[in-house]
Image (tube, rainbow, N blue to C red):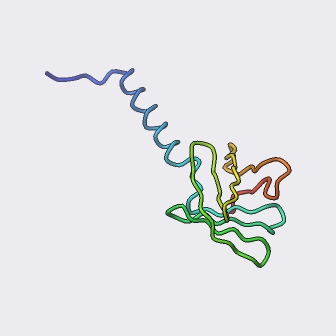
Amino acid sequence: MKKKITLSNALMFVMLLTLGAAIACGGKVEGNTYEDNGGVVKIEFKSSGKAYVSTGPATNTCSYAESAKTVTLTCEGDKTVFTVDDDGDLNGPPGGFMTRLTKKK
């Protein structure tokens, strides 16, 4: 029995493909570097959940975990939760040391 490709099946395929591409490309911090406006704070997200946080000349090794639109950074037992905005930038807790970090191109 031969199957016909209908317009609705073709549209569904295109929508699923687009959704898959958006999920695969969006929100990942691994392999990216983020920094604050003045470049004083910088976070480099590496593979296997490791991150390097630089504040001025000092660099600390930390860990991180991603979940949907949040990134939890853990340094020496202290956790900081960032939300990933639509531009791909990180927003930290209000009034915290790391409030907004932009993705370095």
Name the residue at 39% across, 20% down. 8
What is the number of callouts on the image? 0
Q: Is residue 29 above or below residue 55?
A: above
Q: Quadrant of the C terminus?
A: bottom right
Q: Along the line of sight, which residue is nearer the eye, 86 or 54? A: 54
Instruction: Tell me which corner region of the image, top left, top right, bottom left or bottom right, holds residue 12.
Output: top left
Q: Which residue reaches farthest bottom?
A: 57
Q: Is residue 50 above or below residue 57?
A: above
Percent x, y of residue 83: 69, 46
On screen, residue 55 versus residue 27, left or right, reads right
Q: In this view, does 26 lie above or below 78?
A: above
Q: Which residue reaches farthest front?
A: 77
Name the residue at 29% across, 24% down. 5
Q: Quadrant of the N terminus?
A: top left
Name the residue at 70% across, 49% down. 82
Percent x, y of residue 96: 82, 54
On screen, residue 89 versus residue 27, left or right, reads right
Instruction: Tell me which corner region of the image, top left, top right, bottom left or bottom right, holds residue 38.
Output: bottom right
On screen, residue 85 versus residue 11, left or right, reads right
Q: Along the line of sight, which residue is nearer the eye, 54 or 25? A: 54
On screen, residue 85 versus residue 97, left or right, reads left
Percent x, y of residue 22: 52, 42
Percent x, y of residue 97: 82, 58
Q: Which residue reaches farthest left?
A: 1
Name the residue at 65% across, 57% down. 73
